[in-house]
Amino acid sequence: MPYRIPPVSLDKLWGSKTIEPWFAPRPGLLGEVWFQTEPPLSLLTKFIFTSDRLSVQVHPDDAQARERGLENGKTEMWHVLRADPGATIALGFRHEITLDHARAAALSGEIVDLLDWKPVQPGDTFFVNAGTVHAIGAGIALCEIQQNSDTTYRLYDYGRDRQLHLIDGFAVSHLYPWQPQAAPQALDEVWTRLVTAEYFETDLGLLSAPHQLPPAGAYRLLVILEGAGRIAGQPYNLGQCWLIDPAEPAVELSPSTPTRILRTGPPCPLLS
């Protein structure tokens, strides 16, 4: 039976009060909503809401993480849900730079201007491979899908009183422009493949009529971005994340209103 993962809300200094329609208004600045299972899965899904820029940061890959005594690295993707006019994200550098230049730029703040800031709009998807120096700008709501790791090396934080990690961070950083993945590709009349990566594959589904999810051979996470209905007879609503066990037979999705879903999980030939 599909299982609805309880959300965990985290206030952040860069978080936002603008969290509807996914979540009800609440005190504080909501920055992240995590959907974590016990025991943890290999992937973690989040909603992220920003009213200010996040730090300039980078994550290690698996080999680099294990050299540092960590279980695994962090490759991730973002699917933009809402963006204020002029909202941007930074991915990689505008041109290749030297390590000495990068370190000096992080100390002076020049690194912000060296990054490649890209305008965003709802529906955009970005694959962020480990080693990519990146930052999420203000006025954005997005869904993040990532390897289940909280290892983040901050390179610059706009003068906020938080620790930086310049030695470890630049040891794992790609000091050159980011390379996008291939364009989304339709799988059938319902699902479009957004990302195919070593650790996960993610599809966007648009449902307006009952639809059967076939067995995948690996667990799947369903993040409800819009709409309401029933999954295997249980009510679903936007702002939720559901876990489908790999042993689950075909699952019936019955939308009562048009529904937009992200489906993600480990790579599986059955859904490729």
Image (cartoon, helix red, strand yellow):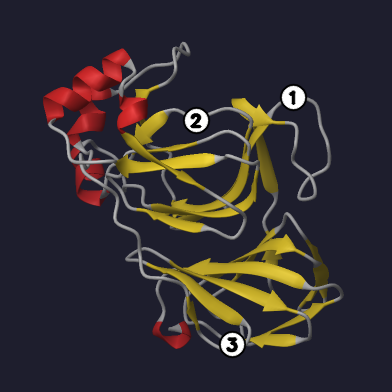
Quadrant into which the C terminus falls? bottom left
Q: Mark 2: few, some, or many residues within 10 Å (few <14, many ≥20)?
A: many
Amino acid, disc 1:
Gly
Q: Mark 1: few, some, or many residues within 10 Å (few <14, many ≥20)?
A: few
Corner quadrant of residue 23: top right
Residue under label 3, please give it. Answer: 214
Tell me the residue at 76%/59% (across/down): 238
Corner quadrant of residue 123: bottom right
Amino acid, disc 3:
Pro
Amino acid, disc 2:
Leu
- SS category of the residue bearing label 3: loop
Farthest residue in the front direction?
A: 86
Q: Is residue 118 left or right of residue 74?
A: right
Farthest residue in the right direction?
A: 256
Quadrant into which the N terminus falls? bottom right
When the figure is inspected, residue 41 is found, relative to residue 55, above or below; the finding is below
Residue under label 1, please give it. Answer: 28
Residue placed most toward the observer, 232 or 56: 56
Residue under label 2, please give it. Answer: 54
The mark lying in front, picked from 3 and 1, is: 1
The mark nearer the N terminus, 3 or 1, is 1
- SS category of the residue bearing label 1: loop
Give the image location of residue 154, x and y in percent.
36, 27
Tell me the residue at 71%/86% (across/down): 211
Give the image location of residue 156, x and y in percent.
36, 22
Tell me the residue at 48%/13% (across/down): 160
Give the image location of residue 128, x and y in percent.
38, 51
When the figure is inspected, residue 205 is found, relative to residue 58, above or below; the finding is below
Q: In this view, does 231 lie to the left or right of 13?
A: right
Label disc, if present, on residue 91 of the rendered structure: none
Residue placed most toward the observer, 91 or 193: 91
